[in-house]
Amino acid sequence: MGNTKHPIRITQELLKTLMLELKHIPKSLLVFLRWGILTLVIGIIIGFVGVSFVYTIHKVTELRQDFPWILLGLPFGGILIVFLYRITRNHDDRGTNTVIASLRSESTIPAKMAPLIFISTAITHLFGGSAGREGAALQIGGSIAHLFGKAFRLNEADMRILILAGMSAAFSAIFRTPIAAVVFAMEVGFIGVMRYSALLPCTIASVTASFVAEKCGLGLTQYSVLNIPQITPVSILQTLMLGILCAVVSIVFCILLHATEELMEHYIKNPYLRIAAAGITILLLGLLFRSFDYFGVGEQIIHNAIAGKTVWYAFLAKMLFTAVTLGGGFKGGEIVPTFFIGATFGCLMGSILGLSPSLCAALGMIALFCGVTNCPLASLLIAAELFGMQCVPFALIVIAVSFLLSGYQGLYKEQRFLYSKYKDEQIKE
């Protein structure tokens, strides 16, 4: 009883605490308004750029599909890409890795990155290179945000936050997954640490860009998953096995991408010859597989896999096409090919494991995405946005397994692992 505080004293302490907290509100409001205005503008600008990019990719893809002979121009399209980077003196382009490195203030993002990646990715898709869009999205978003930050003379810390907001906006506009876009930008650079100071800027930029994309006619990307089973011990074991297999595929895919790039650079020093050789190789692969399915994005094949239809070798073919495309110097991204590989592999494994091929195709997409990007939270949110909440329990299982078993492989060489995947401890570089 002797330690009991008097009510008046308690009230005085509470009022004192309240006054101290209220002192922070004006400063917090100023930060809120500052980031709100900056990232709203960034979201609008990048939203329109992202919409233009998506429509451009759609148009060049339709053109290639209407006139398949355009594929024969793939080596010449590659030479044009190298020429564009050479005349702009961007000889040592590292693509998305440049954007990720800028988050540690180890490099700057050139203003010319946005138009270069926009045009070169369009050329890649026009002539049938196997690449995605997210590489362009992250580079466009990061480049525009960096240019905007320089114009307003932001310090290094604020510049990094603005770059994350730009990445979120571009990812959101192009993929129409605004929630996942926020977390992906905050998660991808440093595995094990989330930059919560960027939460509000990324959110405003992402939601704004998604709103702009919606008003410009880009619908939300959603898939209808068929035959989702009940959660039982058997279905959990089947899902665990799928996660293990997807982790293996993600490791193989990352190694194949990096090894192909290194081998081609080692044996073909001249970038013009290297990209031309890659273009010819892709055309020969098309003849070998006797299919147009592995050129370009391959969105229809992803939809077919979600519907439960695929050929057994589809994931292997896409891995080869993508490795040669990106390893040879063509521009684009790895995420949509990852979705393609994951969907077709998952669909195949679903038939073997006795689990819904449609569900396994969806889970394969998410598990492979997690395995190659090392972004489990973003992966889970993508699953919810693309497939609905019914798939989330199964998605969580394959994500957890894939994240652990994929080790420290990844698409982005500049990505840093700050915490171990296996122990509760920091990683010392």
Image (cartoon, grey):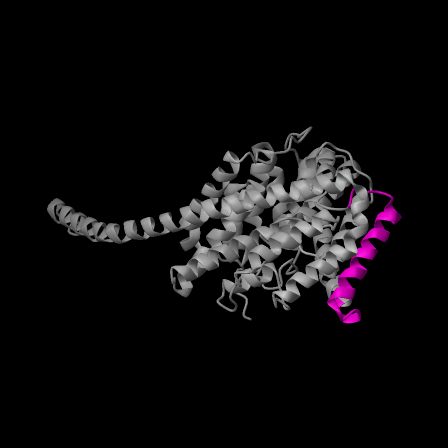
Q: Does the magenta stretch include residue 285?
A: yes
Vertical relation: 253 (above or below) 309? below
Q: Position of residue 289 (x, y in %)?
A: 86, 46
Q: Which of 196 and 137 is in front in this view?
A: 137
- Which residue is at 45% across, 44% downward? 44
Can residue 131 be seen from the camera position used here?
no
Task: Count the labels in the image.
Answer: 0
Q: Position of residue 166 (x, y in %)?
A: 49, 52
Q: Nearer the viewer, residue 31 or 45?
A: 45
- Which residue is at 49% across, 39% downward? 212
Quadrant location of the C terminus in the rendered image: bottom right
Give the magenta range: 265-294
Can residue 196 be seen from the camera position used here?
yes
On screen, residue 205 versus residue 254, left or right, reads left
Vertical relation: 90 (above or below) 341? below
- Which residue is at 73% across, 36% downward? 305
Farthest residue in the left direction? 8
Does the magenta stretch mainly form a helix, a strand or a loop? helix
Vertical relation: 177 (above or below) 165? above
Q: Does the magenta stretch include residue 165?
A: no
Q: Where is residue 304 in the image (x, y as percent from the top left)?
A: 74, 34
Q: Position of residue 142 (x, y in %)?
A: 51, 56
Farthest residue in the front direction? 87
- Which residue is at 63% across, 44% downward? 56
